[in-house]
Amino acid sequence: MGDDFKVDKGIPLPTTTRGRSLKYRWCDLEIGDSVMFKANKATAVGRNKINTIRSSSLRYGKSHKMKFRAALVVGGIRVWRLS
């Protein structure tokens, strides 16, 4: 063995930092809970935010075997966890 191969013992593994953190904490919602996001559907930025929130909840639900329902309400969008 060369000098560049040295065995170390007792070194702990680093905490996992792979992937990105969740922007929306869907895992915090229990069945029947809902969360409201303020957005103005009359503006392009507001419509983009609405679409992002809706698709994020549906993607998270699909990968974690949960069901979410998003609906436009006065002042923005509300997302409910159904199962």
Image (cartoon, helix red, strand yellow):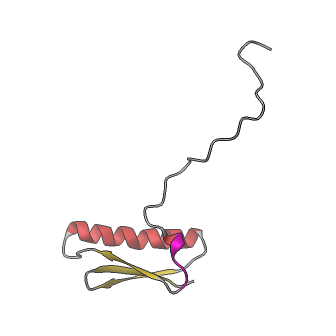
Q: Quadrant of residue 47?
A: bottom left
Of the 4 image quadrants, the one containing the N terminus is: top right
Q: Quadrant of the C terminus?
A: bottom right
How many discs appear? 0
The image shows residue 55 at horizontal and vertical percentages of: 42, 70
Q: Residue 33 at x, y = what percent?
A: 48, 83
Rendered view: 13 above or below 75? above
Position above or below: 10 against 78: above
Residue at the location (38% across, 70% down)?
Answer: 53
* Side of 74 relative to 60 (left or right): left
Q: Residue at x 49, y 53 (%)?
A: 20
Q: Is residue 20 left or right of residue 45?
A: right
Rendered residue at 51%/87% (across/down): 32
Residue 14 lies in what quarter of the image?
A: top right
Q: Position of residue 77 (x, y in %)?
A: 33, 79
The residue sitting at 25% across, 70% down in the picture is 46
Magenta stretch bounds: 27-31
The residue furthest left is 42
Quarter location, residue 48: bottom left
**Residue 48: within the magenta?**
no
State the predominant SS element of the stretch in magenta: loop
Left or right of 38 in this view: 78:
right
Residue at the far front: name it: 10
* Residue that sits furthest to the top in the current view: 3
